[in-house]
Image (tube, grey):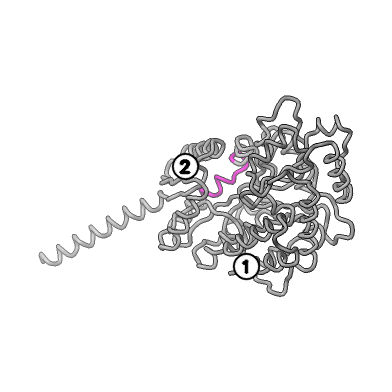
Amino acid sequence: MRLRAFALGVAASLAASLAMNLSALAGELTFWHAYSGQKDKVDFITYALDEFAKAHPDIKLNVVAAEQSAYKTKLNTAMASGNPPDVFYTLPGGFLGAFVAGHQMYALDADLARDGWGESFLPTALAQTSIGGHSYAVPIDIDAAVFWYNKALFAEKGWTVPASYDEFLALCEKIKADGLVPMALGNKDSWPATFWFQYLEMRLKGSGLVSDIVAGKADIALGPEATEAFTRIASLSSKGYFPVGFNGMSDQEANMLFLNGQAAMMLNGTWQIGASADAPEGFELGFFPFPSVAGGKGNPGDVLGGVAAAFGIAEKTANKKDAVTLLRFLTSPAVMTKYVELRKTMVTVKGATTEVAAGPVLYAISNDLMSKAGKLDPFYDTAMPPKGTDAYYTSLQGVLDGSVAPADAAKRVEEALKAK
C-alpha cells in the first residue's frame, strides 16, 4: 500500500511538474534580433516590444540583442549546436537558405494563409523569404538602389536627369569637364560597386537570373551580358568618372564628396536618405532610376532591391502559436508604419509606407518606383551562397582597378553564384 501511495505521489508530482513546464512553455519565447548599435534600430525594437508586452502580457519574451556582424556569428553558432532561439532575425537569400537546407526553419505557409496575413505583404518581398515554394520568414523592410543627385546643383549647372545610359555617359562628360567627380563611389568594403554590375546585367539580360541560380537551376547562366556589364564598368573607371582611389575609400568618405558638392551623383541604396540628413544648407536630395540601356533585353522598370531583414521561427520551437502571434504583431500595419517613421526605410507591408511617416523622397520611391516595378531583383551578394560572396567582391574590385579582365570576372561571378 505504501508503495502504491508512493507511486501515486510521484505520478502526481510529475504531472504537476509537466503542467507547470507546459504552462511556462505556452507563455514564453526566446527572441533574438540584430537591432543593436544604431539609434533608429534600437528606437524601433524598443517601441515594438513595449507595445507587444502591453497587447500580450501573457507572453514573456527573453530578448537577446546583438550588432549585425556579431549577431550572424552568434545565430550560426546556436543553429549549429541545435539550440536555436524560438523567434529570430534573419537575412534572406543564402543566409536563410542554409537554415532551410538544414531543416531548421518552420514553414509559415498555413499561418500566412489565415485571415489574409500573407496578402498583406508585397508579393515581390515575400518571394525573397520563400524557398522551394514555401515561406520560411516574414520580410520586414526593403532597400532599393537608385541614382541620387543634388537637385540644386543640377539646376545651377543646367544638367538634366538622364533617361538612357547614353545620356548618362554624356552627362558624366559634362560634369567631369566642369571639374567635378561625376559619380561618388567608395568601394573599400566591396559591396558599393555591386550595384553597378547588377543593374547593368539586369538592363542587358533581364532580372531574375540570380534567383534561378540560387534556386539550383544549373542550366541558367549569366551569359555574354555579364562580360558586357563588366566591360562597361571598367570603362567608367578608366574614364575617371569615379573619385581617385575609390577602391580604398569608404562609403562614408564617398558620401561626404557627394554631400559637399565635389561629386554630382551617387548610385546607392535608400539608406542614402538618412545619410544625407546632415547635408549642407542648400543641398536638395533627388533621385532617378537606373536608365535604360540601348539594345538591352531587360525591363527598364525593374528595380534592384532586396529584403534587408526578416523574422522566422525555428522548427524546434514548441510554442509555435505564440511565436506566430509575435510575428503577426511585428508585421502589423501600425508597427510597420512606426518602423518607417523611425528608420525612414520602406517596409514590406502594403500601405504601411505612408507619406507622413516616410517623408517626400522615400514616399516617392515607394509610390512611383517600387509599386510600378515589373520585378524586384534581390541583391546578388545576399542572394548567393555565402562562399561565393568573396569571389564576387574581389572580381568586381579587380575589374575596376584593371587587374581582372571582364570575361574572367564574369566566369568567376557565375561560379560564385552556383557555389555551395
Residue in the picture at 86% in, 60% down: 296
Q: Position of residue 276 (x, y in %)?
A: 68, 34
Q: Is residue 352 left or right of residue 373?
A: left
Q: Is residue 113 visible?
A: no
Tell me, for residue 108, which label it has, or none: none
Secondary element under disc 2, as helix, strand or loop, is loop
Report the residue marked by disc 2: 56
Report the residue marked by disc 1: 132
Q: Position of residue 16 (x, y in %)?
A: 27, 55
Q: Earlier in the sequence, mark 1 or mark 2?
A: 2
- Give the number of the mark in front: 1 or 2: 1
User: Quadrant location of the C terminus?
Assistant: bottom right
Looking at the rendering, the stretch of residues picked out in magenta corresponds to 325-335
Magenta residue check for 332: yes
Asked whether disc 1 touches disc 2, contact meaning CB atoms under 8 Å apart, the reply is: no
Secondary element under disc 1, as helix, strand or loop, is loop
Q: Position of residue 366 (x, y in %)?
A: 74, 43
Residue in the picture at 69% in, 58% down: 396
**Rendered view: 220 above or below 267:** below
Location of residue 112 (image quadrant)? bottom right
Location of residue 129 (image quadrant)? bottom right
Magenta residue check for 123: no
Q: CA distance from mark 1 to mark 2?
A: 33 Å
